[in-house]
Amino acid sequence: MSGSLLVAGTTSDAGKSVVTAGICRWLARQGVRVAPFKAQNMSLNSFVTADGAEIGRAQAMQAQAARVEPEAAMNPVLLKPGADGRSQVVLLGKAVAEVGALDYRERKPVLLERALECLADLRSRYEVVVCEGAGSPAEINLRDRDIANMGLATAAKLPVVVVGDIDRGGVFAAMYGTLALLSAEDQALVAGWFVNKFRGDARLLAPGLEMLRELTGRPVLGTLPMLSGLWLDAEDSLDLTTVVDRGSVRGPVGADVLRVAVVRFPRLSNFTDLDALAQEPGVLVRWATRAEELADADLVVLPGTRATVADLAWLRERGLEPVLKARAAAGRPVLGVCGGYQMLGQVIEDQVESKAGTVEGLGLLPTRVLFGREKVLARPVGEAFGERVEGYEIHHGVVTVEGGEPFLDGCRVGSVRGTTWHGALENDGFRRALLREVAEQAGRAFVPAPDTSFAAAREERLDRLGDLIEEHADTDALWKLIEGGAPAHLPFVPPGAPRATETDR
Ligand SMILES: NC(=O)CC[C@H](N)C(=O)O
């Protein structure tokens, strides 16, 4: 088999990432060598590949669904929005520039070239490449410079399926409108629909699907049920609540639960770190933005952030500083990860990210931070509590440790711990040992379950996505589309794309 497909969506969060991952897993199970691809991502949730390239976590997750190693070509452009309205542009895994939206627009023709090269490269090495679009393909103001949706599809002649979220309502209008606002050339590639997050009665839905097919000349290729607890490396913060929403996990093993409050920074990054905690039976993870919300927490986590100094200022404005200091003084646990770890130190010297110069830290750890122009991207391996720990690093700030006890690459003083490593909590033995120590310091009779496997839980979720496609999509039609491209003579639905006016250009 060989071919390709672009999965677009009527809105952000319609389920493109999940459908893409599901198709990858379904194909991998059929023995197809498949790779995911997303030309351009806007996300603060990123991952480091084995060769030190930074890509969106969603593509790393999809690569896992495809059972292949994630690589830079799978997500050539990653945009990481900062506190100043500008974004860092990560091109082929390396940060190359900080730009505003208008400068970025100027760069897009070049970026499209790069994206097409990467796609061609993947297509030469894999049998199938499943591409994910970004946002909606019908952003009529952005179409002329689009590199992730129809701009990519037309340049690479990809058949397109459009995913709509029926849970929000308005799915038929969204689908019809998406098609009708595309040019005839673009419409010729849109070959079918996926209705996602369905939880109604299929008999009631059926006539609507038929009407949609008649109105658009394109079939619904799948109606996918709403799955709960299936959160997998979301790109943006739209569904952050679901990161910690684990309604179905088992209850605590010991007598007590462990309450974890995660400070929800405005520029929170790498929130996947919390996924491993939330999966532990008896660990209750919730977001916190107010001082009161930290009061009854057994552990407070300061997670990673794209804007350390700005988010530290936010933390102070919110009145969290005295609460954190009182906690530390009382020997109650605090864990800082990357940006959160940087805040815990004595002083932050930053002429790079915030350009604020010298900023006083929270003073809870004996560390100093110096921001460097070069971003550190690494996949460190170490040991803590006698357990092997693998992590990944993505940061400009470099921490110098001047005391305390070692804790991974960072340090610990009493109940306050910090590390630059993301992903450490995904290591089962380490996570359990840390939770045991935290419970002891917090005075809780909490016992971590002996058998929670983060990797197995992820695999199970990816399998459920594969099942979703296998059981609820027309896989024969999908297979044909991937191999044969969009069928000829798909009808044009008026009015088509409006003409851009001179002032728009
Ligand atoms: N991953 C992070 O938390 C990054 C921290 C900080 N923004 C830095 O770049 O150094």
Image (cartoon, rainbow, N blue to C red):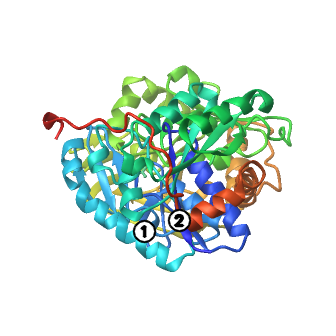
Residue 429 screen position, x and y as percent: 72, 61
Crowd band around label 1 with a 10 angstrom C-alpha radius: few (<14), some (14–19), many (20+): many
Which residue type does callout 1 highlight? Leu
Q: Where 411 falls versus 219 (above or below)?
A: below
Labels 2 & 1 near each other (Cβ < 8 A): yes
Is the residue marked 2 within 8 Å of ligand 1, measured from its CB?
A: no
Residue 280 screen position, x and y as percent: 74, 46
* Residue at image coords 44%, 60%: 55
* Residue at image coords 62%, 50%: 19
Q: Is residue 476 left or right of residue 161?
A: right
Q: Where 52 falls versus 139 (above or below)?
A: below
Marks 2 and 1 sit apart, C-alpha to C-alpha, by 10 Å
Of residues 22 and 61, the one nearer the viewer is 22
Q: Where 451 falls versus 15 (above or below)?
A: below
Q: Quadrant of the N terminus?
A: bottom right
Crowd band around label 2 with a 10 angstrom C-alpha radius: few (<14), some (14–19), many (20+): many
Residue 468 screen position, x and y as percent: 73, 50
Q: Quadrant of residue 402?
A: bottom left
* Residue at image coords 63%, 63%: 480
Q: Which element is circle 1 on?
A: helix
Camera-near label (2 vs 1) is: 2
Q: Quadrant of the C terminus?
A: top left
Return the residue at label 1: 119
Task: Specify whether residue 477 is in view.
Answer: yes
Residue 413 screen position, x and y as percent: 52, 49
* Residue at image coords 71%, 30%: 207
Return the residue at label 2: 4
